[in-house]
């Protein structure tokens, strides 16, 4: 379905009934990345997968303000309102994890629990953020100038995704096809508007996140394991699961194990809802 919010259209896929679970994909991704997870969880949870602005079948506006992470988080709360969902569990992968955490910090009343897959609260220092903004803006310009295929050829070979080379060819081809189908303008503006260096640092806000948080990282993804280990020290109610033998994109690299981890975390809440009076 398409939901219109603030002059932007958003593609939303809903599957299942029960506790709502909002699913937020990563940069270059789209809601179809969650297809297998939704199959696993939808018998017990209402899975709501959104194409984030600039991605998939959602709008690719020219205005960079429509990509600011605070604005995107607000628009997602408006989408939830349109769907009559007052509060939801939120699972975000990588860029989607940064967005999920932004929602939990800016709109805590909307978020029941948080699952962050290979995500960060942003970059701590302004100098590091400035450097990242510079590199992301150069990357954004390359996407526009050289086109989506040249970008994807480079992107799929960054060290962060090295473990994906172990995946069956058909899965690698599916990831590549999903990336190639993205809009150059949408990806470029996503980097310019909500890139890792563009967003505020939320490191100083983690101690105020009172909801249950599950951090999930791939053991081979050393960078985001370090980030998760540090996040856990500040988050009042966090648990961290390191998944052996996989890297950054756990929900693709070992979707069965990932589904069991998510199911186990969310099942705690099902017990509460069934007994609600
Ligand atoms: C390369 C780094 O950061 C990028 C990598 C992961 C994030 C992401 O969403 C990628 C999803 C995917 O292609 O599977 C992306 C983001 O958070 O926007 C980062 O730009 C890095 O070393 O931090």
Image (cartoon, rainbow, N blue to C red):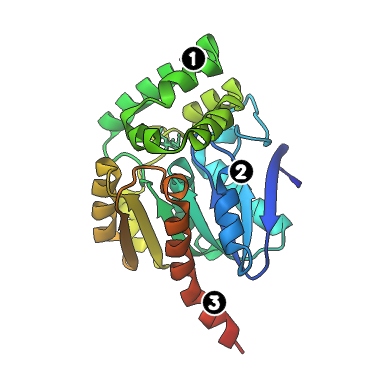
Which residue is label 3 attached to? 270
As rendered, which of 88 and 261 lies closer to the eye?
261
Residue at x-position 29% and y-position 53%? 244
Quadrant of ligand 1 in image = top left
Q: Quadrant of residue 235?
A: bottom left
| Image location (x, y in percent) of residue 68 | 52, 36
How much space separates mark 3 and mark 2, taking CA atoms? 25 Å
How much space separates mark 1 and mark 2, taking CA atoms? 23 Å
Which residue is label 1 attached to? 150
Which residue is at the far top?
A: 145
| Image location (x, y in percent) of residue 25 | 53, 44
- The answer as to whether callout 2 falls within 8 Å of ligand 1 is no
Dot 3: element = helix
How much space separates mark 1 and mark 3, taking CA atoms? 45 Å
| Image location (x, y in percent) of residue 241 | 32, 59
Which is nearer the N-term, disc 1 or disc 2? Answer: 2
Residue at x-position 44% and y-position 32%? 195
Which residue is label 2 attached to? 32
Dot 1: element = helix
Q: Residues within 10 Å of mark 2 (few under 14, many from 20)?
A: some
- The answer as to whether callout 3 falls within 8 Å of ligand 1 is no
């Amino acid at each position: 379905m398409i939901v219109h919010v603030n002059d932007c259209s958003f593609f939303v896929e809903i599957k299942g009934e029960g506790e709502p679970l909002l699913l937020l994909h990563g940069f270059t991704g789209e809601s179809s990345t969650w297809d297998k997870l939704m199959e696993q969880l939808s018998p017990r949870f209402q899975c709501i997968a959104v194409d984030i602005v600039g991605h998939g079948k959602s709008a690719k506006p020219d205005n960079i303000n429509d990509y600011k992470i605070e604005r995107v988080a607000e628009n997602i709360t408006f989408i939830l309102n349109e769907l009559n969902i007052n509060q939801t569990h939120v699972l975000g992968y990588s860029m989607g994890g940064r967005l999920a955490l932004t929602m939990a910090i800016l709109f805590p009343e909307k978020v029941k629990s948080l699952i962050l897959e290979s995500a960060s609260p942003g970059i701590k220092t302004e100098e590091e953020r400035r450097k990242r903004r510079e590199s992301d803006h150069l990357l954004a310009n390359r996407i526009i100038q050289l086109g989506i295929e040249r970008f994807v050829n480079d992107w799929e070979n960054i060290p962060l995704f090295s473990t994906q080379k172990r995946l069956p060819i058909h899965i690698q081809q599916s990831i590549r096809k999903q990336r190639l189908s993205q809009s150059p303008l949408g990806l470029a503006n996503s980097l310019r508007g909500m890139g890792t260096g563009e967003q505020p640092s939320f490191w100083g806000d983690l101690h105020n996140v009172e909801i249950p948080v599950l951090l999930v990282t791939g053991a081979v993804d050393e960078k985001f394991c370090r980030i998760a280990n540090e996040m856990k020290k500040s988050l009042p109610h966090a648990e961290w699961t390191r998944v052996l033998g996989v890297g950054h994109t756990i929900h693709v690299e070992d979707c069965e194990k990932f589904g069991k981890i998510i199911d186990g975390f969310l099942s705690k809440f099902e017990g509460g809802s069934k007994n609600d009076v």
